[in-house]
Image (spheres, rainbow, N blue to C red):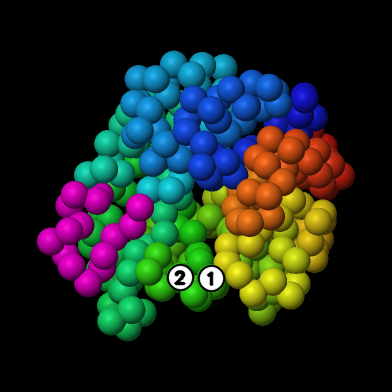
Amino acid sequence: MNLAHPRVSVSAVSSWRQGFAEDVAMWDRLGIGHVGLSLRKCEAAGFDVVRAALHGRRVSNVVECGWLDLHEPSTWPATTARWMSAVRELSVVAPWCLVLTTGAAWRLDWDESATRFAEATADLCRVAREHDVTIAIEHTGSLRVDLSFVHTLADALDLARVLDTGVCVELNSCWAERDVDRLLAAERVAHVQVSDFVIGSLSTPDRCVPGDGDIPLARLIGVLESAGYRGAYEIEMVGPRIEAEGYESALRRAVTATDALLASAAPAA
């Protein structure tokens, strides 16, 4: 498989239960040269192994990094030290985005949560800038209060302005949000995750291959392109539909569909 558009990326999260070596073998079979990494998988494989395997590949982002407990400041240094280590270990393949969810803060109000997150990540943001890595805050669905206090794209943009960071747009979580076209045009959009959703599903996560669901992906990608976004469109699919079909089959179809969506909206560089 040869991708026509260089900005289509495949996330290691899309092959959730595979290890790093299995991901690399699958990427080779599919001809995928632009990837997003899972920090969990990288740590399990070892960073030396990861760096060697990435030779000739582009990295769009690192995700699945764990999260802070904003209720417990004593736990922050260990978590942020892990993130800073990842930035340093993978600086050889920079620039890329470190995609973070904020972590648990349900006993705090939003402004206090933002203040604590800014305090906890101040050193991380400095180290990331030094290594040409962009911090991108990802919003989550409101069921996942264990992962984040940021549940809309609008709130993610507000937090990014406080932190002076970027935002990771998860289209599956914001496509039905009020005024989404205006939000997608924000300058702080640093990374975009692409998948689809079948209306009527009551489980989460339950993502599907682009084109199999109801999200108006062509329109949303058109908005992003018109606004000047020039980063990656990363396929990040997880849930029972992907497990039932199998990672390789689902990704083959997803790459073809996303490639066509982007090629129609943005001619290949």
Position above or below: 203 against 84: below
Identified by mark 2, the residue type is: Arg
For the C terminus, the image quarter is: top right
Q: Which mark is residue 141?
A: 1
> Could you tell me residue 23's position as x and y percent?
55, 30
Q: Nearer the viewer, residue 203 or 181?
A: 203
Q: Residues within 10 Å of mark 1 (few under 14, many from 20)?
A: some
Question: From the viewer's perspective, is residue 41 above or below residue 265?
Answer: above
- Answer left or right for 195 relative to 169: right
Q: Is residue 265 left or right of residue 151?
A: right
At 26% from the left edge and 68% from the top edge, which residue is drawn? 70
Identify the mark at residue 203; answer none if there is no mark: none
The single residue placed furthest to the front in the displayed view is: 244
Q: Secondary structure at mark 1?
A: loop
Residue found at the far right of this picture: 264
Amino acid carrying label 1: it is Gly
Q: CA distance from mark 2 to mark 1?
A: 6 Å
Say which residue label 2 marks: 144
Q: Is residue 140 left or right of residue 4?
A: left
Region of the chain picked out in magenta, as a range: 66-80
Residue 189 visible at all:
no
State if disc 1 and disc 2 touch (CB < 8 Å): yes
Query: Going 58% across and 33% down the picture, which residue do you hit?
Result: 35
Q: Quadrant of residue 86?
A: top left
Q: Tell me the SS state at disc 2.
A: loop
Please rate how many residues cluster around mark 2, counting C-alpha atoms within 10 Å: few if below 14, some from 14 to 19, many from 20.
Answer: some
Query: In the image, residue 115 lies at what x, y percent?
Result: 28, 71
Residue 62 position within the rendered picture, expressed as x and y whole percent measured from the top left: 46, 41
Judge from the rendering whether residue 111 lies leftward or rightward of residue 233; answer left or right.
left
Front-lying residue, 135 or 202 = 202
Q: Is residue 230 above or below residue 164?
A: above
